[in-house]
Amino acid sequence: MPKKQQISFSKSGILASCEKRSPFLAEIEAVAMSKKVITREEWERKLNDVRIRKEDMNKLVMNFLVTEGYVDAAEKFQMESGAEPDIDLATVTDRMAVKKAVQCGNVEDAIEKVNDLNPEILDTNPQLFFHLQQQRLIELIRNGKVNEALQFAQEELAPRGEEDHSFLEELERTVALLAFEDVSNCPVGDLLDISQRLKTASEVNAAILTSQSLEKDPKLPSLLKMLLWAQNHLDEKAVYPRMNNLSTAMLEDPSV
Amino acid sequence: MTTITTNTASTTTNTAINSNSKNGNQDPGLYFIDVARQYSSPVGGETELEPTELNTVKCSGGFLVVSTDKLRVKYTNVNHHGHNVGVIQADRPAPEKRLVYYFEIYVRNAGAKGQIAIGFTNHSFKMRRQPGWEANSCGYHGDDGNLYRGSGTGEAFGPAFTTNDTVGAGINYASQEFFFTKNGAVVGAVYKDIKGLLLPTVAVHSQNEEIEVNFGKKSFAFDLKEYERQEVMKQQMAVDKISLPPIVSYELVRSYLLHNGYEETLKAFDVASKNTIPSIYIAQENGFGEQHIAYALAQRKAVRQLIRNGEIDSALSKLHEWYPQIVQDEKSATCLLLHSQKFIELVRAGALEEAVHYGRIELAKFFKLPGFDDLVRDCAALLAYEQPHQCSAGYLLEESQREIVADAVNGMILLTDPNVKDAQSCLRSHLESLLRQLTVCCLERRSLNGDQGEGFHLHRALNSTSTAGRGPSANTLV
């Protein structure tokens, strides 16, 4: 129900982003854009006021060790720091064994191990199962077992391709490997590359982690990215001591 | 330009870590006394009070009745003009230090004209008008489905709403938008051009109009959790776009293990990385600059283990043997931490008499010393209770206290390295410095955004799985 009354709003100005410039330019800009200037002393006081608990840092490191599969280190870390892993470390060993099997080309072995861990993983991930079978086919071709490869493609992979069209394309691409004598120079040669194994291995790894209700990536890299992101955004409104090199974590003086 | 202080820990005093040079006269161990003090209050970030009911003191009395639970409103008058709206605000403003605030109404009866509105207004809102008609207010109106923002003229927005509809209003602090829902689905969103605190507000304006307000006591028709999750994902996607060489995480974990003297873990970590990432390993082995941090690794490991096992006497005697300079000054922060820990271990073991005796000899001298007093008093307080675990000084009996003492000694040993250039790197691992930087950047960014939105708390970030969301069972928000 409209009423007569008109009020206008003025929106505050939008600040431009700050690229790397000379300190002098940065200073001019800071003044011109009315950026907040935070001195090193003020900033360090703020840093000191932050509460970071040791056990949380330990947890973060443990999460990295477990997710990345450093089982022995995780075990030792549990003893030395008291941090508890989110998960039974034995299952990490199993997961790493699966990953390693794929990386080494022992796909059959890997499939068996995944099913030992949890048969639902492959049952509920037709795409993953297809990729593993595809990898198996690649390994057969790599080893020159042409007959076996053909039989495997027709019996195991072709029926899957009927379920999903994208599978069929992948299958055809893979079988194409057989058409070339010198596979190193053929258009689908990338399938024989080690990176294809790594890709499949990381897919299995992620699926196992998901089945264990764990995130597929460790939290640490994402927090580090968040730091870079937060600094970039803060640059738009303030001049303050940054950490430009994450590996050294050195605080660098604001350029004003 | 004013300084905005967003202290997360008011108890902290500014001590050891200042500038990157060694501070001659100040005891660096004081830094760890501060850390210990932080544990005396619970971690949890900010908690803001939420609206829970309607504010019956300040409302358009005479036009509406409010139920006794202060969650139901009915218009009882016959309206004649635009200045007798039955408008009522929540008892508290919408909390700001979060991603999203949201509340709902259920229309029990659309009454004669269905002139029901839901939205946000500020404290100075004129309590006889529809939300949206006045400056600094915004409202979604049921009779025409229009959105009103500081104007008596509405903008086409969404469907009208009437009896049996559930309608919601929210503030998305990340996108700085108001959003509205009808029966569980988002109707639309608009830029939030009002600064400052906002009160959830509802209005009824024709005979027999009756609504129920839900501030979250009952479950919402709208899937707020999913909305929040999507919002987090949006931010996560922006963050994920930033590229970061995987080696950085690896290096930080390694330097963390080195810094803390987790020698066994480090060995296992290096053996494993040798197989998987050979190039890194070689670079590390030939690398320079980390020598000083590998300094006294075996000794630091040994002392840490002793302290973690509560064997303080052994730790002290090792220190006397290896690094007498650390325990030379009987009134240093490190000595206080070690002696107080010994005292705590005695209390833990129930040897109270011995604890009293020990306290008189070793702790009494720290009484009244600035910076030390609080810790000494908390130690003494443990004696006063039959169940010391449950008293306010109970935090001292936690495992974390041993860890702080171990960290302090570790830092002090690192400082004895003659090659050390940066005192700060002895007291904090790189990882910790980065996490502090992250926290301050997020807080500072928020304070420059009118203090609205989420901050960053490591503790919360680690204990929520909201960013996972990819797994089938990973959508439980903590």
Image: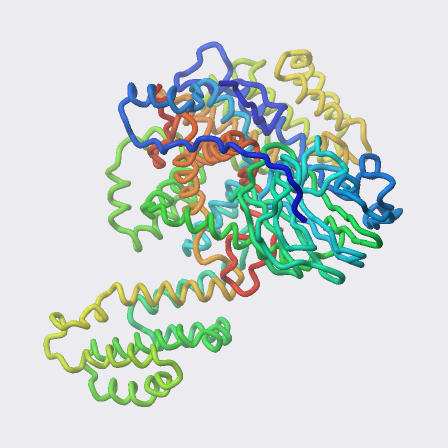
Residue B432 visible from this viewpoint = yes
Report whether B396 appears left or right of B432. Answer: right
The spot of residue A234 in percent (x, y) is: 43, 32
| Camera-nearest residue between B381 and A155 | A155
Q: In this orientation, does residue B303 appear?
A: no
Where residue B163 sits, quadrant-wise, is: bottom right
Q: Is residue B1 above or below residue B352?
A: above
The residue furthest top is B25
Q: Residue at x 20, y 80 (%)?
A: A176
Q: Nearer the viewer, residue A203 or B26?
A: A203
Which x, y percent locates residue B366? Answer: 65, 14
Examine the image and state in which quarter residue B9 appears: top right
Residue at image position (49%, 27%) is A47
Q: Above or below — where is B331 with respect to B299?
A: above
Q: Establish if B235 lies above or below B309.
A: below
- Callout count: 0
- Left or right, B268 with reference to B383: left
Residue occupying image coordinates x 37% and y 32%: A16
Q: Nearer the viewer, residue B41 or B29?
A: B41
Residue displayed at 64% across by 12% down: B369
Residue A161 spot, x, y in % from top left: 35, 83
- Residue B211 vertical placement versus A104 (above, below): above
Residue A112, how many percent across, how many down?
42, 76
